[in-house]
Image (tube, rainbow, N blue to C red):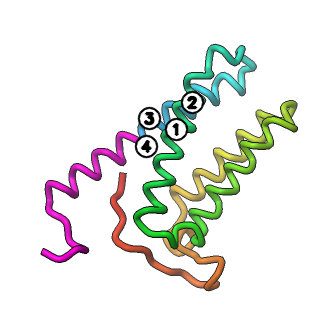
């Protein structure tokens, strides 16, 4: 078996891990997002925020380790833009709701946009495909 091929067992294990991470990430976003949008005290949604940031960081690291070109594809670039928007929560605290809505809308574009958009390289100015992805 070559390095690029993986067994069916490895594939399903990776798929299950990535799907579990994504599920935790969505749960964290929903919990923190609800708290932010409804102006609930931070203590009530802080654990969800931590869950969203930790799982999102793991998912991002997963993609970078799998193929560094993720960083120059639109899906990676927009993910970094989302992180910058989240950092703006500190200086622009009065606009947390608007920033969160923008982050969620960018997430939908990244997750559900056509492959030609997600895989578009800002460096090459064309679509570049990565190694085989593990969906999840």
Q: Is residue 136 left or right of residue 16?
A: right
Q: Tell me the crowding category of disc 2: few under 14, some 14 to 19, or many 20 or more residues within 10 angstroms, Cα based.
A: some
Q: CA distance from mark 3 to mark 1?
A: 9 Å
Identity of the residue drawn at 50% across and 80% down:
128
Q: CA distance from mark 2 to mark 4?
A: 14 Å
Q: Is residue 99 magenta?
A: no
Q: CA distance from mark 1 to mark 4?
A: 11 Å
Viewer-side residue, 104 vs 93: 93
Q: Which mark is residue 89?
A: none
Expressed as whole percent of the image width and height from the top left, the position of residue 119 reads 52, 72
Task: Name the residue beneath numbered marker 2.
Answer: 50
Task: Name the residue beneath numbered marker 3.
Answer: 24
Expressed as whole percent of the image width and height from the top left, the position of residue 90 reads 81, 35
State if disc 2 and disc 1 touch (CB < 8 Å): yes
Task: Name the residue beneath numbered marker 4.
Answer: 22
Q: Tell me the crowding category of disc 3: few under 14, some 14 to 19, or many 20 or more residues within 10 angstroms, Cα based.
A: some
Expressed as whole percent of the image width and height from the top left, the position of residue 4 reads 25, 74
Q: Please identify the quarter of the rendering in which residue 100 is found.
A: top right
Viewer-side residue, 127 vs 123: 123
Nearest-to-viewer mark from 3 and 1 = 1
Q: Which mark is residue 54?
A: 1
State if disc 3 and disc 4 touch (CB < 8 Å): yes
Q: CA distance from mark 1 to mark 2?
A: 6 Å
């Amino acid at each position: 078996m070559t390095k690029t091929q993986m067994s069916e067992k490895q594939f399903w294990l990776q798929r299950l891990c990535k799907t579990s991470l994504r599920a935790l990430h969505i749960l964290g976003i929903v919990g923190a997002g609800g708290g932010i949008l409804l102006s609930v005290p931070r203590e009530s949604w802080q654990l969800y925020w931590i869950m969203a940031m930790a799982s999102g960081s793991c998912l991002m690291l997963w993609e970078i380790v799998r193929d560094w070109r993720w960083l120059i594809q639109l899906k990676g670039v927009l993910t970094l833009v989302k992180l910058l928007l989240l950092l703006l929560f500190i200086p622009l605290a009065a606009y947390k709701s608007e920033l969160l809505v923008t982050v969620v809308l960018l997430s939908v574009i990244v997750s559900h946009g056509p492959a030609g958009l997600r895989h578009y390289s800002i460096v090459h100015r064309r679509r570049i495909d990565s190694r085989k992805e593990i969906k999840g």
